[in-house]
Amino acid sequence: MKIVHGYPPNLAAINRALPIDERYALFTYGNTLYNPSGKYIPEHLMVHEETHERQQSAFEGGPDQWWKRYLTNASFRLDQELQAFRAQYAFAKREIADRKQLSRLAHVLASKLSSPIYGSIISLRQALRRITSNRMTPSRARHHSPKPSSRLPRSP
């Protein structure tokens, strides 16, 4: 992923849709991560942004269409962010041995997801539970149906 000290091409649309202070936010647009502040990006946050890179590359219409849907569809935004925050937390869980530190990080992540920055799309309690849960969320289950079995039925 290429990191650019600057703003994404769709900054005006982002500002119209969400109350983001773009000076301190990160924006993934395709395979480019825009980091306006130029601050250090922790590895667990890179995992979050790399999840958005994969989501956008797999989305029909690419990053432009992904962002249009993300900014106009709160349910889609929640699904995409839950995937990214869960990947970020799972990475941190493997790297952080101190349970209190991991718990604090989980609370920080849930606070961000439940904030106006993402459109207040989920409560803090729900965000914490869904980020840290090992179970697949209902919205992810819809998008990830099991593949049919390739085994032939047994003869009697």
Image: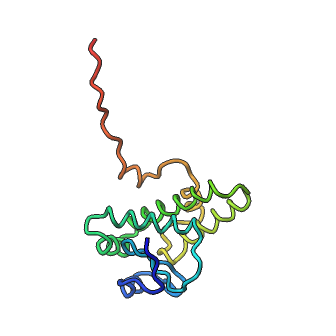
**Residue at image point 41% right, 53% down:** 140
The picture quadrant where one finds residue 110 is bottom right
**Residue at image point 37% right, 49% down:** 144
Q: In the displayed structure, does residue 60 sit left or right of residue 35? A: left
Quarter of the figure with the C terminus: top left
Residue 75 percent across, percent down from the top left? 39, 65
Residue 105 percent across, percent down from the top left? 65, 65
Residue 76 percent across, percent down from the top left? 38, 65
Residue 146 lies, with reference to residue 73, above or below; the image says: above
Direction front: furthest residue:
2
**Residue at image point 26% right, 14% down:** 155
Residue 151 lies, with reference to residue 36, above or below; the image says: above
Residue 53 lies, with reference to residue 16, above or below; the image says: above
Pick the residue in front: 130 or 83. 83
In this picture the colour scheme is: rainbow
Q: In the displayed structure, does residue 93 sit left or right of residue 16? A: right
Give the tally of numbered discs: 0
The picture quadrant where one finds residue 149 is top left
Quarter of the figure with the N terminus: bottom left
Direction top: furthest residue:
156
Pick the residue in front: 151 or 133. 151
Residue 119 percent across, percent down from the top left? 47, 75
